[in-house]
Every structure is written in C-alpha cells, then in structure tokens.
Amino acid sequence: MKRLALGMLGGLAAAALLIPTAGSSPSGERTWDVTITNLTPPGSQPLSPPLFVVHSSKADIWSVGDIATHPVAAIAEDADNGPAESAFVQLPGVNDVFTGAGGPIPPGASRTYAVEASGQFDRLSVLMMLVNTNDGFTGLDSEHLRGHGDTRSVMAYDAGSEVNNELTGFIPGPCCNHPFVRDPEGELIRMHEGITGRGDLSPGIYGWSGPVARIQVSRG
C-alpha cells in the first residue's frame, strides 16, 4: 500500500508539471504588440498597410544591398501586399504572413498590431510603402523577438526597382493615384534620397528628413 501511495503521488506530480501555468501557451507561442508611428511631416507620406512576416533565421525577406524580389517591389512601388502574401508563406523558414488591419497609417498617427511568434520562428520583418514615392518603403529587416522587445527608428529605403522620376503618372499615393505604372530601374535596395523636386512633387510638401517611422515591439 505504501508503494502504491508513493506511486500515485509521483504520477500526480508528473501530471502537474504538464499543466501550463497562467500566461503560458502549450505550443510556446508568444504574443508581441507592434506599434508603428508615422514620423513624416503632416500631409507628406502615408505609410501603406504593413506586411508582417514571422520567420526563422533561415529566411531573408529583404535587406539593404540586395535586389528587391517581385513581392518586395510590388509593395514598394504600388502598396500591393498580395504577391508577398502568396509568395512568402511558401518560403522555407516562414511561419506567418499577414497584412495589418486598419488601412494606411497617416503622418503623425500610430497603430498597434498583434504578432504571434514561437520557437525558432522568432524573427519579424515588416514592409510598408511611402505611398507618395516611386518605390520608397520602410520597415524591419529580421528583427529578433526576444526579451521585453525593442524600439527602432527606421529610415526610408529605395527598392531600386523603379526610377525616382517623381512624376505623377508613376506614383500610386493620394498625390497622384496612378498605381501599377512602372519606370523600371534594376538597382539594389539602398537608402532613399528623399523627394528632390526633379519631377512633379514638391520637396516642401512630400519630403521628409531623418527617420520616417518608429516601430516599438513589446511583449503582449
């Protein structure tokens, strides 16, 4: 009887170890709040609805110095997340791809999104177009989701896929409203030079200086 009682107590203790504690998830999932603030001047550059990609260190969504893939170029040129949602989910090392709800983020506005990460899928990449540009974008490149999170002030990047002609006939934003019209370039992703005034756009209206967005990642 004594051995039986001890065996029952041992079984109960083992079972207790399998019961998740409050705030944990059996699958190891963690929720992160991602708050994006548009830092561009009033009326200048709305940010397109952000694309979120949760992935492992084996996946590379975009990087400065690389050629922009077709899905990245589609966002940077036309704020079109559709090709990325279809293509990135099939990449090795990618766990989740989705577009944040709520539409574009106006200058000065903030919006918060929930992102789920688990196990090896602990990297976050984000893409948003500066919609009054030819192929300007911003976001995060493989941000490591760890600890209590981090805050990044992010710059504008040039996808290198379209010439920065600054002509209204090639820009999809509210300044121009001409999506899917291209002036191909074929360069690498690089820092964006800003609005120069070489075309139809006024730097005083559509330009910016410094970081174009602040992205805060914190535990949900």
Image (cartoon, helix red, strand yellow):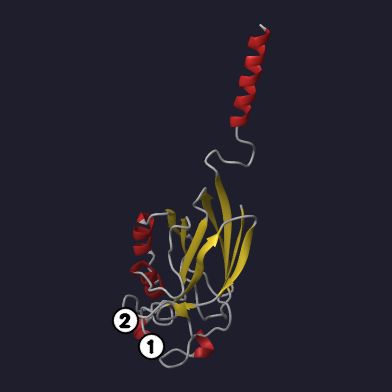
Mark linked to residue 94:
none
Quarter of the image for residue 77 reads bottom left
Q: Residue 8, image x and y in percent? A: 63, 15
Judged left or right of residue 34, residue 63 is left
Q: Nearer the viewer, residue 22 or 3?
A: 3
Disc 2 marks which amino acid? Pro
Looking at the rendered structure, the kind of residue marked 1 is Asn
Could you give the CA–CA distance between mark 2 and mark 1, rounded to whole angstroms? 11 Å
Q: Residue at x 34, y 64 (%)?
A: 83
Query: Residue 217: x, y in percent?
Result: 60, 60
Nearer the observer: mark 2 or 1; the answer is 2
Frontmost residue, 32 versus 58: 58
What secondary structure is marked by label 2?
Answer: loop
Would you place residue 12 above or below residue 155 in this image?
above
Q: Relative to 174, is 118 on the left or the right?
A: right
Q: Which mark is residue 165?
A: 1
Q: Residue furthest top?
A: 1
User: Element type at marker 1?
Assistant: loop
- Residue 53, horizontal then vertical, whole percent: 46, 59
Question: Where does label 2 land, which residue?
Answer: 184
Query: Image height check: is 219 above or below 197?
Result: above
* The quadrant where residue 41 appears: bottom right
User: Mark 1 Cα within 10 Å, few/some/many (few <14, many 20+)?
Assistant: some
> What is the x, y in percent for residue 13?
64, 24
